[in-house]
Image (cartoon, helix red, strand yellow):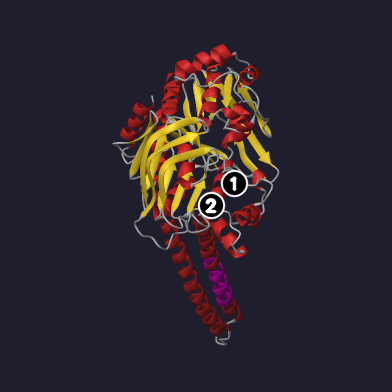
């Protein structure tokens, strides 16, 4: 028998200039496995925080009968914190021995040490730490905000197993359709201030949305035809009425008729015209309203655009032979042999901490404390762009225009505006916003706008799907389909990898780079192969 864990009554949340949602009445039962989806900024994270009693709603109430645990999105401030892991765990009401046991039991890792500063942990390690904290509290309800960010395939598998064995209920916000299909059996869509419920997993939800769009398109076309027909009828009626008036005036001036007869014809012509015109105008008004209702609110740009290198020749960009990768005194990879050619599409996967990001940095030349030693050749005048996980190139004190200008000093104001528009920043209030108040998705889009403003040969994206809604991910994927240069992606988001046409898959395993047998075009086989390498 199901057990109600949480119920809301007319829940609303208002910002100074926007209402995120209103009058939400939802109920969560024991055993519910819910995926919460919606565009960036629709209010998903806010709703989870309200359900977790992290923030107060503007209106309405929440009735919680059992304990809940909220796992927040990764806050990059944690990656700068000098607080120790043990102190952080204690501050969240748990003991380090229990967390250590959970990390070893669930995640097969003892790499996290109690005396470590949080800033020394990877994003994936912090997510695993939070999941262990959740396990320690034995909640009946889990509220998970983008838990798949930064997780390797092994971590995703553990998270999947954890959720599938969880006896309570969970609501998960995720941008990863493949993972949602593995763990949820209900999709809630937060859009237009309301929640729409779809039974089934993400694939079922996606199919229902597609069918609804097609039905709406057919209805839209039919209604448009009816509107055009009504407008033509009104024109015909106006011409007929004009003729009737003319004929009525003749009869009115017909002296063979009595005054009563002339008045009758005059009133008849006037009433007929008024009645028909009113009827047709009502039809037109109704059809116009219906057309407006059915018309999709299309974004001004639904397809991001990357600049292309005009040379476009199939040539070797980077060749690495018999090399090693070191970070400080630590050797991460040995016997590195890579050839990257113009037009290549490569995905790089592996466990958290295996060296994926370090290798990506080394390939584009952003070394820092990363050293790639050996025989390395790069093509003359190689143009590269690198997008890191933390979006470190952004100056959060500046607005969007200023950030682009600093990174691309040769661009005119018009070119900057055009570049921002390519990445869905159109409005005047958007381009003048301080970067500090951007959402995670907006921050990612700004970073991409900054690094791709010029022509590039090699684009390296390190976990580009983090913080982006599925709609924006699809827009980026569409743009990458047209990108002709070499592309290297560090990601475990199989839906995204499938969309961008990955042709070569490399996995870091036991300090070496190995080619994979499968590709994201076969998602389940690809996922299983990664897991087999990482566990």
Q: Residue at x 51, y 61 (%)?
A: 283
Residue 304 placement (x, y as % from top left): 48, 54
Instruction: Look at the image and tell me whether residue 1 can be seen.
Output: no
Q: Which mark is residue 393?
A: 1
Residue density around tag 2, few if under 14, some if 14–19, many if 20 or more, within 10 Å:
many
Residue 193 placement (x, y as % from top left): 58, 41
Instruction: Look at the image and tell me whether residue 19 can be seen.
Output: yes
Residue 452 placement (x, y as % from top left): 51, 54
Q: Is residue 370 left or right of 346 when viewed as pictured?
A: right
As for residue 268 lying within the magenta part, the answer is: yes
Q: Is residue 17 above or below residue 55?
A: below
Q: Which residues are magenta?
A: 264-276
Q: Give the labeled residue for mark 2.
A: 451
**CA distance for labels 1 and 2:** 9 Å
Q: Is residue 486 left or right of 138 when viewed as pictured?
A: left
Question: Which residue in the rendered view is the most extreme toward the bottom?
Answer: 255
């Amino acid at each position: 028998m199901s057990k109600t864990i949480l119920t809301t009554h007319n829940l609303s949340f208002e910002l100074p200039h926007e209402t995120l949602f209103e009058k939400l009445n939802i109920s969560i039962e024991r055993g519910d496995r819910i995926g919460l989806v919606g565009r960036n900024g629709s209010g998903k994270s806010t709703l989870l925080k309200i359900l977790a009693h992290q923030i107060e709603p503007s209106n309405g109430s929440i009735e919680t009968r059992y304990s809940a645990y909220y796992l927040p999105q990764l806050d990059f401030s944690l990656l700068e914190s000098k607080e120790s892991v043990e102190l952080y765990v204690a501050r969240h009401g748990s003991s380090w021995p229990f967390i250590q046991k959970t990390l070893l039991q669930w995640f097969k890792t003892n790499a996290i040490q109690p005396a470590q500063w949080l800033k020394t942990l990877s994003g994936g390690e912090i997510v695993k730490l939070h999941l262990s904290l959740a396990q320690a509290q034995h909640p009946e309800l889990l509220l998970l905000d983008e838990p798949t960010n930064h997780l390797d395939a092994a971590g995703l598998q553990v998270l999947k197993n954890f959720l599938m064995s969880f006896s309570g209920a969970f609501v998960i916000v995720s941008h990863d359709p493949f993972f949602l299909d593995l763990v949820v059996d209900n999709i809630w869509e937060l859009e237009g201030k309301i929640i729409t419920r779809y039974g089934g997993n993400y694939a079922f939800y996606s199919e229902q949305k597609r069918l609804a769009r097609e039905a709406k398109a057919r209805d839209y076309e039919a209604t448009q035809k009816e509107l055009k027909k009504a407008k033509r009828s009104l024109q015909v009626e106006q011409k007929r009425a004009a003729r009737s008036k003319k004929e009525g005036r003749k009869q009115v001036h017909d002296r063979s008729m009595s005054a009563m007869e002339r008045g009758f014809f005059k009133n008849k012509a006037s009433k007929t015209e008024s009645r028909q015109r009113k009827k047709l105008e009502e039809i037109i008004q109704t059809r116009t309203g219906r057309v407006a209702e059915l018309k999709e609110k299309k974004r001004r740009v639904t397809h991001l655009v990357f600049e292309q290198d005009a040379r476009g020749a199939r040539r070797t960009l980077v060749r690495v032979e018999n090399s090693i990768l070191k970070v400080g005194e630590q050797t991460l990879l040995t016997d590195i042999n890579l050839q990257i050619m113009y037009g290549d599409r490569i995905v790089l996967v592996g466990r958290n901490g295996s060296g994926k990001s370090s290798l990506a940095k080394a390939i584009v030349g952003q070394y820092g404390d990363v050293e790639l030693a050996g025989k390395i050749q790069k093509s003359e005048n190689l143009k590269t762009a690198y997008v890191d996980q933390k979006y470190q190139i952004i100056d959060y004190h500046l607005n969007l225009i200023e950030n682009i200008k600093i990174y691309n000093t040769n661009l005119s104001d018009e070119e900057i505006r055009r570049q921002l528009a390519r990445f869905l920043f159109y409005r005047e209030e958007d381009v003048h916003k301080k970067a500090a108040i951007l959402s995670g998705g907006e921050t990612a889009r700004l970073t991409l706008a900054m690094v791709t403003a010029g022509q590039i040969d090699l684009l390296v994206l390190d976990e580009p799907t983090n913080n982006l809604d599925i709609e924006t991910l699809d827009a980026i994927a569409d743009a990458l389909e047209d990108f002709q240069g070499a592309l290297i992606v560090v990601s475990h988001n199989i839906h995204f990898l499938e969309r961008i046409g990955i042709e070569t898959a490399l996995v870091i395993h036991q300090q070496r780079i190995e080619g994979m047998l499968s590709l994201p075009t076969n998602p389940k086989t690809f996922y299983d192969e990664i897991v087999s390498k990482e566990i």
